[in-house]
Amino acid sequence: MPLVLNEEQEMLRDMARGYLTDKAPVTQLRKLRDTEDESGFSRDAWRDMAEMGWTGVLVGEDHGGVDMGFMAMGVIAEEMGRTLTASPFVSTAVMAATALRQAGGGAHDARWLPSIVAGEAVIALALDEGRKHDPAKTAMKAERHGNGFKLDGAKTFVADGHVADAMIVAARTAGAPGEEQGLTLFMVEKDAAGLKTERTMMVDSRNAAHVAFDGVEVTADAVLGEVDNGAVILDRALNAGRAALAAELSGSAQESFERTVDYLKERKQFGQVIGTFQALQHRCAHLFTELELARSIMMKALQTLDEAPEHAGHIVAAAKAKVSQVARLSANEAVQLHGGIGMTDEHEIGFFMKRIRVASEMLGDANYHADRLAKMQQY
Amino acid sequence: MSDLETFRAETRAWLEENCPPEIRKPVESEKDICWGGKQWTFVSEAQKTWLERMAARGWTVPSWPKEYGGGGLSKEEAKILKEEMRELGARSPLDSFGIWMLGPALLKYGSHEQKLKFLPPIARGEIRWAQGYSEPNAGSDLASLATKAVDQGDHFIVNGQKIWTSYADECDWIFALVRTGPMEPKHDGISFVLIDMEQPGVTTKPIKLISGKSPFCETFFDDARAEKENLVGELNRGWDVAKYLLTHEREMIASGGSGLFDARPLGQHAAQTMGVEDGMLVDPVLRADLTRCDIDGLAFMCAIERYKDEAKAGVGMGAKSSVLKYYGAELNKRRLELMMDIGGSEEFEWESPATNEGKIARMWLRTKANSIEGGTTEVQLNIVAKRILEMPGA
């Protein structure tokens, strides 16, 4: 397949851009922040997105999805990045949907996928336990208990955890922290006894949660996929989530860049528009080339997820690394080139810097993925 | 079978039959790349045979029209030929500035007579062409060139000097930008002429570079003669031809057609050269640099693929070729710096069989020109800022 959007995807992009700039722009995120909104995202907008089919973009038609594939998912995520739209898209419509679909054939997909598509259920991935993302380091234990398991431990930085109807929880049933094998995934519903969720406000005004598991008992049916072999499904879900974040970051980075270039064409100092200065032109031109590369590798990752998902790990890691690095550069340049006004809360450019910084860290930063890539290539 | 499938099958069979076994191996030395021309000495009988056989079919320039020595192939057929040659590991039968640059310029701007006269010898590798653009005082500001061509009725008398003319000492003819309208604004007084180098008024002098090699010359014109009939395009409209060619050149460089940029991962090369402990390269700081460079290389290849696909879908590459030219040049320089880091002191052995006569060191030095030739890095950034970002002029 050529590395360009097809007609259907272009229509989706135009529709998404139209909707998001109209109904879920940066001013909405500001309002959610300032009103300390309980959900941290607009339920109305989320329902609209469900109606437009976005929640089912990766869900098969058998469960009511539109099944348009990863490239289409990326188109939506990229546009959400342009408007900094807060929603459970990545946690629920991308990662949970991918995990449930991948596990397939059991009770979980039939139970959850239709309500994800309907925009009713929010499902979070409870994975990270420390300050740096590293699934292999998962230490939280799930011990056999009667016919089921008992979960003890704590998860941190669980995106959308405070509003989740259920969580996909990664816990260790074998092996030791540091080993990729030995993890099992569990579906844990929000009202499970012993589950305690505490919302944390992040710098980007989005939500994450600290989640404590104090002897949470689940039945054997709660297992998503196979015991000890959760990495198979987890990897697919993480690849999907990382690609979605890469697309979102690419959108945010492009938008902040375009706003910056527009600003340089307006702002006057020394009696002239500052965009005439070659020192600034070259910084912008360089950044543009970086953004072009970042967007290209991001699209390649999405394309690979559509065409050969079993071989996508390498390109997704490279894409997440590259886009995270470039997006941070874009955000930093944006604030610097806006000058003093860029430091004010009133101006929107700071919102881009904050979200880009958090999304770069999520599901592994540039260093983490560069290291993974090197390891994949035996060096 | 569709027409294209038939073409593929026939092409494969013909290549199998006609490509000598010696030609089906990767290029090992510079002489393995055939540049043609009157002074060319074939490195082997196979190299000569391969050129003759391919030229007879017009396949040294597959997409040029047949009447001008080409193969008359459609884009799709030319692509199939390329794929089948790659499949077989067949080397290119002929590389030259005539094919890459003068040919496209003549096809677009040349008269029918000029095409008939000059294109077939290019296709057969009989005439080797040099490019006469830059001058000592006209580098990035190419349009300020001063080499004069004075109208003498049926010919011009040319005086001046060109620089950075690739392999001019091995070339037969030169296509050059000359000033024919000294009173006109600088872009409007330039013409594109073809000059026979086999005359007393044209002399060349190789320039020794920091790599120790001399791929470029200075070329001097002292009352050299250029026939009027060899003026390409209109008088004083040579800048149009030059601009067309520069964009073409950049796109070719950018799309990897020139083989100038190599984005192969460095990590494994480093692991083999330096060693690995606990699955990780022994130098952790270098390892980090390498992974970042490899990621950028991968992203660069993706950008090339995307731009090519966009071009196929009808969105021309235009100024975006400057994105690739800029990034590719800088990336290549980074890669070779890292190659030198990997090699350490040994890599600096200049005249030693151990380093193949300083092969990587010479490549490292060669890459420094990547961001100077074909429009400097700074010029590319100007183009991106002005033409893509539409930032205002001073």
Image: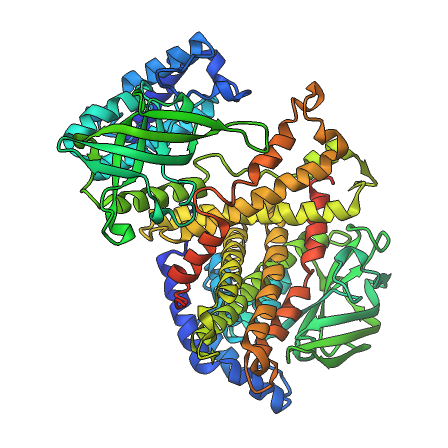
A29 relative to B321 in the view: left or right: right
Estimate the x, y position of residue B105 in percent, counting from the top left.
Answer: 27, 37
Which residue is located at x 18 percent, y 25 percent?
B116
On the rendered structure, is A226 left or right of B176?
right
Q: Vertically, is A293 above or below A336?
A: above
Q: Is residue A47 left or right of residue A327?
A: left
Instruction: Say which residue appears at 38% left-offset and 60% top-offset.
Output: B387
Q: Name the colour scheme.
A: rainbow
Residue depicted at 85% across the width and 62% down the height: A141
* Residue B111, x across and y down, in percent: 16, 34
From the image, which quarter does the C terminus of chain A lie in? Answer: top right
**Which of the pair B124/B348 is nearer the observer?**
B348
Instruction: State the residue lying farthest toward the top.
Output: B45
Q: Position of residue A122 (x, y in %)?
A: 61, 74
- What residue do we see at 22% from left, 46% from top? B181
The tally of labels here is 0
Residues A303 and A186: in front is: A303
Relative image position of residue B342 (x, y in whole percent): 72, 37
**Image position of B61 with respect to A155: above or below:** above
Q: Please say whether residue B303 is visible from this viewpoint.
A: no
